[in-house]
Image (cartoon, rainbow, N blue to C red):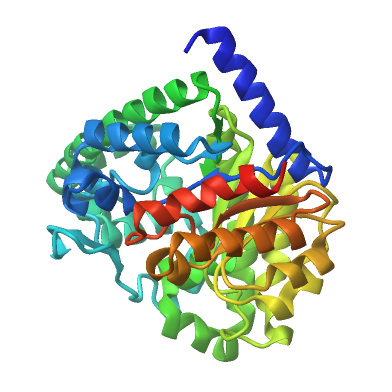
Amino acid sequence: MGANEGAVRHAEKLKRVMDAVQLKRPDRVPVAFHTMLWYAKYGGTTIREVMYDYDKAAELGRRAILEFDPDMFAPPHQFTTLGRVLEAARFKQLQWPGHGVGDNQPYQYLDREYMKAEEYDEYLFDPSGFYLQKYMPRVLGVAEGLEALPALPGFFYMRLVMGMRSFAHPKVVAALEAMRAAGEEANRLVAAQAQFTSEMEGRGYVLAQGAVSIAPFDLIGDYFRGARGILTDMYRRKDKLLAALEKAIPFIVRQTIATCKASSSPFVFIPIHWAADNFMSLAQFKTFWWPSFRKVLLGLIEAQLIPVPLWEADCSSRLETIADIPRGKAVYWFERTDLVKAKQVLGGIACVRGNVPPSLLNMGTPEQVDAYCRDLIEKVGRDGGFILDGAFGIPDEAPLENARAMFQAVRKYSA
């Protein structure tokens, strides 16, 4: 494909996507390609091989994108080919093939307490210091030696100069050397991703995400306090929890903006874990979850970025609340929420995305997938503001013919 042809195709697909985002009626419903570990099934190999082989993942990603011809794509490197980096960092929050699970099994998250209840005050007083000296050593094996670092803001003038001896501590030296090696592997991964992304954009496809971000409640709940910890904190340490959520906002927003601005895409993917109807009451959602996340959304929108929260599970009771954002500035991707109802509530506010069920893509027939997509296109996509996708992209076990049926449906029913 020539450069001019690729540029023309990219402009066409980008306009189609942006028309949907801005709640206009595009020439047809755009369709996105997102998956995590399905590449192994697609390529007839193991999840472990795809996770550790950058070239193999790129080959399979290229084949799938060219076959399906989506409007938007997520490169395999962000969620799939993480094995080498996880291993180099000795990451403790996940199990992955070869490290706790079998060669053909998906990631398993280890829900544990990585910040103790009595450590809220330390986090609130100095988040960076807590992160460097306590949090990182708990979640990264390579960072364990950082526990030997002193409280750096206490150094000044000649005390700062003499304080350099802290970085000669054997544990700190070992940690920094191990972190450098992990960083070099991360650089190789990012270079492979950049090369793949450039190639696919040159062929006319729109990068679906320039950064990955998080909701403050999910950050503290998933990665600091754990499920039991944060649910207890909602009752026993309400003020501390709310203060921690507020404290996290500028760190999340600034890092997300910096990452996204360095890419070619304004889209920010935000997997949502704790907003579901069955996790907390609507009153609790309005108190603990939504206010801090709304500030993150507004911060990203103000920076001319496009948030794409993936609302996992059923969030039907939240629809009226989460409608309180600027019009035409975000994409709300729903896993199980009824998209017809979501479109009724949010149709004048946000583009909706989704949500072909994984059960259908895994166990249904191509004809059933086709019929489901047609129903979504006709009921949700008729007047624009809709992007077709799986409930969470293409699930790991989906037969090729079912995945193919989803992408073919937009060309059959939405022109």
| Residue 201 in picture, x, y percent from top left | 51, 24
Give the side of residue 4 with respect to residue 118, left or right.
right
Give the side of residue 17 with respect to residue 50, left or right.
right
Residue found at x 21% / y 53% = 47
Total marks in image: 0
| Residue 211 seen anywhere in this rendered image of the structure | yes
Above/below status of 281 relative to 151: below
| Residue 327 in picture, x, y percent from top left | 85, 51
Give the side of residue 53 with respect to residue 264, left or right.
left
Above/below status of 148 relative to 7: below
**Quadrant hosting residue 246:** bottom right
| Residue 154 in picture, x, y percent from top left | 43, 48
Give the side of residue 400 with respect to residue 279, left or right.
left
| Residue 304 in picture, x, y percent from top left | 73, 36
Front-most of 8 and 186?
8
Residue found at x 49% / y 57% = 127
Front-most of 301 and 208?
208
Above/below status of 372 relative to 270: below
Residue found at x 37% / y 41% = 76
Residue found at x 57% / y 12% = 5
| Residue 162 seen anywhere in this rendered image of the structure | no
Give the position of the C terminus as an image quadrant. top right
**Quadrant hosting residue 210:** top right
Front-most of 138 and 121?
138
